[in-house]
Image (spheres, rainbow, N blue to C red):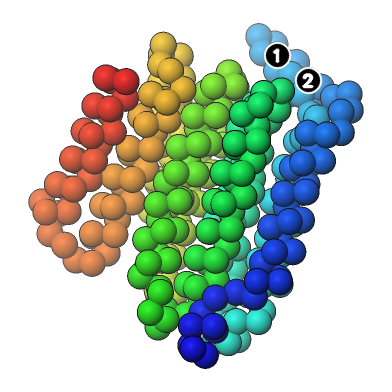
Amino acid sequence: MLESRSSLPSADRMGMLIASVLLTFALSRLIQTPGLTLSLSLPGFYYAFPITLGSFMTLFAAALTAAGMDWLMREHPASEDRASREHLLLPTLTAFVMGTPLAILADSQAWWSGFIFGAILLTAVCVAEYITIDPSTPLYGLARAGLTAVAYALFLVLVTSLRFSGARMVVVIPSTFIVAGLISLRILHLDGTDRWDFPWAAGIGMVCAQIGAGLHYWPLSAIQFGLALTGPLYALTMLSVSLSENVPLRRAVVGPALMMLLAWGSAIFL
């Protein structure tokens, strides 16, 4: 009983963290303020970036999640023996990514569905990250698998939302590079070691960004665009894991190749 308790976060602290983040998103919908537009004008180039209260609240929610997770993990029995910075990454990204679809659905009744789904997703990510602090816990394997699945889902939600919102390439490509790199970095670190594969993460982010740039002006729907980018992210991350485990190259490329075909085939026929 004591072991099972120690592997799960305090319900009171978890409730305060999730409630604070959700309140931030709720206030961004309830409070209406005029937006501010930042523009950049160069010869042959003009870009206008609108800044709203929702933009600030999304950044605040992400920062609040990072601070809350750090506070939550301090009570874990194994927190003194392991660094905690990697456990802040996915919860912070989850809160940040939540802001994009919620902003798109702000004037729709579907906003509540996205709000509830985001609350469940954020709670699951925070609990799973808390469990993975101690690789020896019986729930570690389940938490690791759940975090991996959520990480890919977050990337799919982000790039799909950016495509649906009509964001320009100057926003889509850097966002794709940064988020793909961070997600692959966290997934590759979930093997329980202290190894950070920065070269692989940067390379995966670069490939996903280049594919996104090439597909940006194609007549693809939002979900087609999302699948076309999520497939390479999954395949390259899987390839990196296989190679790190000394799997022969010919065997290592089979799984990623099949996943690429599946993702791009789904994108074509949707």
Q: Is residue 45 visible from the viewing direction of this image? A: yes
- Between disc 2 and disc 1, whose residue precedes? 2
Q: Position of residue 258 (x, y in %)?
A: 18, 40
Q: Tell me the element at label 1.
A: strand
For image coordinates 16% across by 62% down, the residue present is 247
For image coordinates 61% across by 44% down, the residue present is 116
How far apart, in angstroms, are the residues tagged by discs 2 and 1? Answer: 7 Å
Give the quarter of the figure containing the C terminus: top left
For image coordinates 78% across by 33% down, the residue present is 29
Three-letter code for the amino acid on which mark 2 is drawn: Ser
Whether residue 66 sits left or right of residue 262 in the image: it is right
Residue nearest the observer in this picture, 175 or 202 = 175
Q: Position of residue 203 (x, y in %)?
A: 40, 46
Query: Mark 1 highlights which residue?
Result: 46
For image coordinates 47% across by 72% down, the residue present is 132
Whether residue 102 sits left or right of residue 83 in the image: it is right
Q: Position of residue 158 (x, y in %)?
A: 53, 36
Residue 260 in which image quadrant = top left
For mark 2, does the 10 Å Cα neighbourhood hold few (<14), some (14 to 19), or many (20 or more) residues? few
Q: Position of residue 153 (x, y in %)?
A: 44, 44
Q: Tell me the element at label 2.
A: strand
For mark 1, does the 10 Å Cα neighbourhood hold few (<14), some (14 to 19), or many (20 or more) residues? few
Three-letter code for the amino acid on which mark 1 is drawn: Tyr
Contact between marks 2 and 1 (CB within 8 A): the answer is yes
Q: Of the numbered discs in the image, which one, if any, rests on residue 39?
A: 2
Q: Of the numbered discs in the image, which one, if any, rests on residue 195?
A: none
